[in-house]
Image: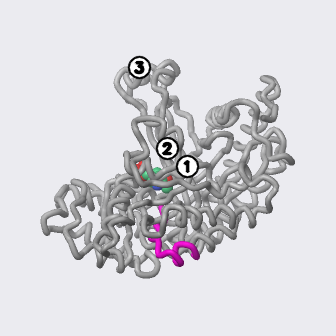
Amino acid sequence: MTVITNHMPTAELQALDAAHHMHPFTANGELSQKGARIITRADGVHLTDSEGHQILDAMAGLWCVNIGYGRGELAEVAARQMRELPYYNTFFQTTHVPAIALAAKIAELAPGDLNNVFFAGSGSEANDTNIRMVRHYWALKGKPSKSVIISRKNAYHGSSVGSGSLGGMSGMHAQGGMPIPDIHHINQPNWWAEGGDMPPEDFGLQRARELEEAILELGEDRVAAFIAEPVQGAGGVIVPPDSYWPEIQRICDKYEILLIADEVICGFGRTGNWFGSETLNIRPDIMTIAKGLSSGYAPIGGSIVSDEVASVIAGDEFNHGYTYSGHPVAAAVALENLRILEEENILGHVRDVAAPYLKQKWEALTDHPLVGEARIVGMMGSIALTPNKEARAAFASDAGTVGYICRERCFANNLVMRHVGDRMIISPPLVITPEQIDVLIERATKSLDECYAELKAQDLLRSA
Ligand SMILES: *Cc1c(COP(=O)(O)O)cnc(C)c1O
C-alpha cells in the first residue's frame, strides 16, 4: 500500500490544527502544546498517521467502523447517490428511496414489533428524539405527568443538552447547565468498582431494584421511561451481572415504564447479534441507533420504535425533526453497510471466530500483575487496572492517571486502546482476524508491561 505523502509536514499541520480547530472532549490548550496525532488514511483494521506509522485500531474509530476501513463499495454508493439525489428532506409529506429502503431494512432486522424508524444525524440527536417522543407518547395517552426519564450514573447517551442530561457523566453535568429537568439517575451495575463484598449476582439484583425504588419514590404516575445501554460502553465497558437485566425487564413490565435500549454501540453486530438487546434478552420499546449503522462512513442515527408507541405518536403532529433526518447519501451508505454485514456473514464471523478467540486471549490478560478483572461481550471488552487484585483496589493517584499512562504506551506500540479512568477498553472492527487479534494482544501486553515499569519507577503502584 502506498502512503500518501503529498500533504504538509506534520508540524505544520499540527500548528494549523492548534490555531483553528477546537477538539471535542479535549483540553485544547494542552493539546496545542503537544500537537495532535494526524491520521491520514486507513484500511481494514489499520490506521496510517502522518509519520507513516501503521496503527492497529482496536477501537474501530469511536466504536463505529464495524466492517473495517477502506470498503470501496460504500464510496461508490455515496458517489452514485450524490449524483442522483444528493439531498432532499423528509418533512412536509415527502420521502425518497434511500430513506424508505433503509427504514424497511432496519425494521426487518430489528426484533419483535420494532418496525418504525425515526431518523437523526447521530446518536445524540436520536436520544433527543427519544426524550420528546416518550413524553409526548404519555401525553397523548392522557398521562402528561409521566415525564421523568430514569437513567444511570456513568451512562453515555450523547453530548447534546438533552442526551448529555440523559447520560450520567458527572464531568459533563458540571459544565454548561446540565442536566435538564425530569431526568433521574440511579447507580450502575459496576460490580468491580462498587460491589464491595457482595456476590456479583446479588449486587446485580440490588442495582436493578434501584429502578423500582426510584419509580416508587418518584411515583408511578411521574415516570415515562428507563434508558440504558445493554452493555455500558463509554463508561468503561461495564458488563452487568447476569441477574441485572431480567430484573430490570420485570420492573419495566410491572410498572408499564417504556424501556429505551441505547444500541448505539451494541447494535449492528458488536455483541454477536444484530442488537445487544438480543444478546442480553431485553424487550425494548425503543432502540437508539447510530455508529455501526453506517460503520461510521456517513453520519446517521435514529430511533427504532415499537408499533404501539409509533401508532400513538402517529395520532398527532410530532413537532420534531432534523434537516438531515434520513439524509439520502447517509441512508444509502448505511444500507450498503448493512448489505455487507449480512451478505458477508460478519455476525457469523464474530460469533464463531473472532469473539470466542478474542475472549480467550482477553481474559488471559488477568495473568498480568496490573490487570484485575477482564470482561468481554462479543467484540467489546475492558480490563480494570489495579495495584491490588484481591482487594479490587483503585490507585491512590487521581482516576485516569494510570489509564492515561497505559494508553500512551499503547499508542507508542501502534495500538489504539482507549482508557476510561483506569479501565482500558477495546471495540475493534468486527472483521478482525485471529492473526490480527494475536497482534492486538501482543501489543497490549507489551504496553501493560511498559506501563507497569513506569508505575514502579514513578511510585504509582499504591492503593487508594
Ligand atoms: C456514541 C454514543 C451516543 C452518541 O452518539 P453520537 O453519534 O456521538 O451523537 C449515544 N449513545 C451511546 C451508547 C454512544 O456510545
Whether residue 426 sits left or right of residue 394 in the image: it is left
Residue at left offset 66%, top offset 44%: 424
**Magenta-span inclusion, residue 289:** no
Q: Which one is earlier in the sequence, the residue at label 3 or at label 2?
A: 2
Q: How crowded is mark 2: few (under 14 residues within 10 Å), some or many (20 or more)?
A: few
Q: What residue type is labelled 3?
A: Ala
User: How far apart in space, not on screen, are marks 1 and 3 (Cα)?
Assistant: 30 Å
Residue at left offset 49%, top offset 59%: 150
Q: Nearer the viewer, residue 446 or 19?
A: 19
- Asked which secondary structure carries label 2, the reply is loop
226 in relation to 284, above or below: above
Give coordinates of residue 210: x percent, y percent. 61, 62
Give coordinates of residue 412: x percent, y percent. 64, 32
Q: Nearer the viewer, residue 19 or 44?
A: 19
Q: Which amino acid does label 2 sit on?
A: Met
Give the residue pinned by disc 1.
234
Q: Which one is earlier in the sequence, the residue at label 1 or at label 3?
A: 3
166 in relation to 96, above or below: above
- Asked which secondary structure carries label 3, the reply is helix
What is the magenta range?
A: 250-262
- Answer whether labels 3 and 2 touch (C-beta < 8 Å): no
Q: What residue type is labelled 1?
A: Ala
Residue at left offset 40%, top offset 76%: 114
289 in relation to 169, above or below: below
Nearer the observer: mark 1 or 2; the answer is 1
Give the residue pinned by disc 2.
1
Q: Can the viewer see residue 21?
A: yes
* Circle on res. 15: 3
User: How far apart in space, not on screen, are marks 3 and 2 (Cα)?
Assistant: 28 Å
Callout 2: CB less than 8 Å from ligand 1: no
Callout 1: CB less than 8 Å from ligand 1: yes
